């Protein structure tokens, strides 16, 4: 047990390779921009809901609040997911990995990272095709204000890409440091 702890202590002291630092910086900046957009969308959604409440006092409506808020909730969820993972705020079940040590822990972490990355790339492939179809067909919502359906689909695709990049950062940290912890993911 002492030998494993010594290996872990040494792996923490390794300098971060330049390519990992660059990847972290790019991912972190993109995640912060997406989280900022999510925050702005949240404020706009709250404002729209308040306007709708006031309008209903006068028997009026925007007729679009439900659609816009629905798309907004999806957008903020997917745009902020990578930032939440980067900040360690994403739910992670670590009951198994906490008791593992050394190479077994590394292999478990690597398996999880590779599996999630494969799943994200697979989802991105199908979402890319969906965005292309919606763009080519010119599909829109059937509401008062027709919104091109490729826009919400593209936001989902961007969110998946950011999440995939953040998972790639986790993998790079795992490779460069020997094991992975949330504290190692922050710049």
Image (tube, rainbow, N blue to C red):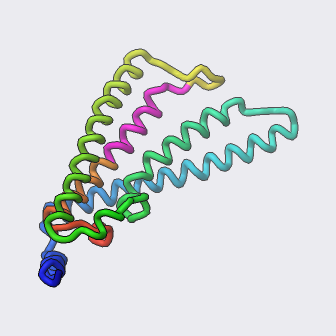
Residues in magenta? 147-162
Quick check: 178 above or below 57?
below
Q: Quadrant of residue 69?
A: top right
Residue 16 visible in image: yes
Q: In this view, does 68 lie to the left or right of 14?
A: right
Q: Residue at x 78, y 43 (%)?
A: 53
Image quadrant in which the N terminus is located: bottom left
- Residue 168: x and y, percent? 23, 53
Residue 187 visible from this viewpoint: no
Q: Using the image, determine if residue 17 lies above or below residue 65.
A: below
Does residue 28 appear to the left or right of 105 in the view shown? right
Q: Where is residue 150 in the image (x, y as percent from the top left)?
A: 43, 27
Residue 163 on the magenta span:
no
Magenta span main SS: helix
Residue located at (24% from left, 58% from top): 169
Task: In the displayed orientation, state which residue is furthest to the top.
Answer: 137
So how many labels did they put on this image?
A: 0
In the image shown, does 15 or 135 lie closer to the viewer?
Answer: 15
Q: Report which quarter residue 101 is drawn in.
A: bottom left
Q: Residue 108 at what x, y percent from top left?
A: 22, 58
Q: Quadrant of the C terminus?
A: bottom left
Residue 8 position (above or below residue 22): below
Residue that appears at 45% across and 18% down: 138
In depth, the one of 14 and 18 nearer the eye is 14
Q: Magenta stretch: residue 156 in it? A: yes
Residue at the location (35% across, 43% down)?
A: 160
């Amino acid at each position: 047990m002492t030998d494993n702890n010594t290996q872990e202590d040494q792996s923490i002291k390794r300098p971060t390779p330049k390519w990992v630092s660059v990847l972290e910086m790019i991912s972190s900046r993109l995640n912060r921009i997406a989280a900022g957009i999510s925050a702005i969308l949240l404020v706009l959604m709250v404002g729209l809901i308040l306007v709708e409440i006031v309008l209903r006092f006068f028997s009026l409506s925007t007729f679009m609040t439900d659609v816009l808020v629905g798309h907004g909730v999806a957008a903020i969820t997917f745009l902020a997911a990578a930032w939440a993972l980067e900040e360690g705020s994403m739910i992670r079940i670590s009951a198994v990995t906490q008791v593992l040590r050394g190479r077994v822990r590394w292999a478990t972490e690597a398996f999880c990272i590779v599996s999630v990355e494969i799943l994200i790339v697979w989802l991105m492939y199908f979402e890319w095709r969906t965005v292309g179809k919606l763009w080519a067909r010119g599909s829109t919502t059937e509401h008062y204000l027709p919104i091109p359906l490729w826009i919400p689909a593209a936001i989902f695709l961007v969110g998946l890409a950011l999440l995939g990049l953040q998972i790639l950062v986790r993998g790079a940290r795992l490779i460069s440091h020997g094991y992975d912890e949330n504290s190692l993911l922050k710049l």
